[in-house]
Image (cartoon, rainbow, N blue to C red):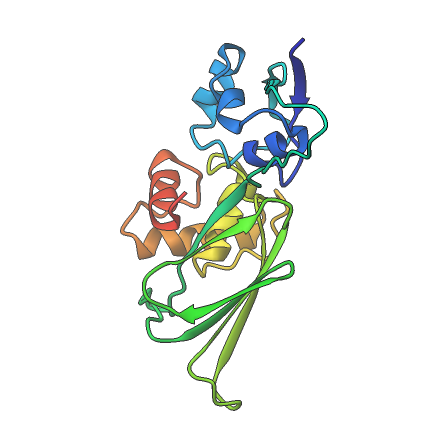
Amino acid sequence: MPIRHTVAQGDTLAKIAARLGSIGWAKIYEHPDNAEPRERRPNPNVLCPGDVITIPDPERKEVSVGVDAAHRFRVTRPRHAVALQVTDEAGQALDGWLYTLTAGSQTFEGTVDGLIEHQVPLEVDHLRLEVRRSDDPTARRIAWDLKVGHLDPVDTLTGVQARLNNLGFCCGAVDDDAGPRTEASIRAFQASQGLEVDGQLGPALLAKLEELHGC
């Protein structure tokens, strides 16, 4: 029978489905009992710790095979699509820079051209992104450690703090504390976007944050 699952930090529907192993994330998302969570969380991979979702019964697939023979079954391992954009202080993309993205035992390399997009294994919880002007050892390098699936919804204070940090308006720790540093970052962001500068988490702020951040 269906079970109730409480979302933990770092959970996405894709990760939850992969742990169960026999049901796709879309089946969970579209289950009738998840209508209310689906309305609150339109992005199935941006959940909030404490959210409660219904996990339907696992699906069983039956196949017929002959006896006295070896049979091979191939399982496609699900992956997360990761899209990253790197800009300078003025918001201009660092096109032409070289990058290295490390995801567990996998390494992806290339040249920044708009978005950096790759498929990474679901079990990978942390990524490391390094960008550099060239392969010259003395060239400028910048690196980030990224947590996959740890971005909270935009209508939470932690979600606002994380997005502001990612956009270069440093709040410091993502700690759910609306202290002076977070308020100053909100005000700076509002001023940069021509919004009313009040330091509050209003609809205009949340909409602009989500628009510029991409989710």
Q: Quadrant of the N terminus?
A: top right
Answer above or below: position of 130 versus 19. Answer: below
Q: Residue furthest front?
A: 68
Kindly identify the residue that appears in the image at 30 percent across and 52 percent down. 193
Residue 50: image quadrant is top right
Answer above or below: position of 31 versus 98. Answer: above
Kindly identify the residue that appears in the image at 60 percent across and 25 percent down. 51
Q: Position of residue 132 (x, y in %)?
A: 46, 78
- Front position in the image: 81 or 180: 81
Q: Quadrant of the C terminus?
A: top left
- Front position in the image: 40 or 197: 40
- Front position in the image: 7 or 24: 24
Q: Residue furthest left?
A: 194
Q: Position of residue 56 (x, y in %)?
A: 60, 15
Kindly identify the residue that appears in the image at 67 percent across and 24 percent down. 6
Residue 177: image quadrant is top right
Q: Position of residue 22 (x, y in %)?
A: 62, 25
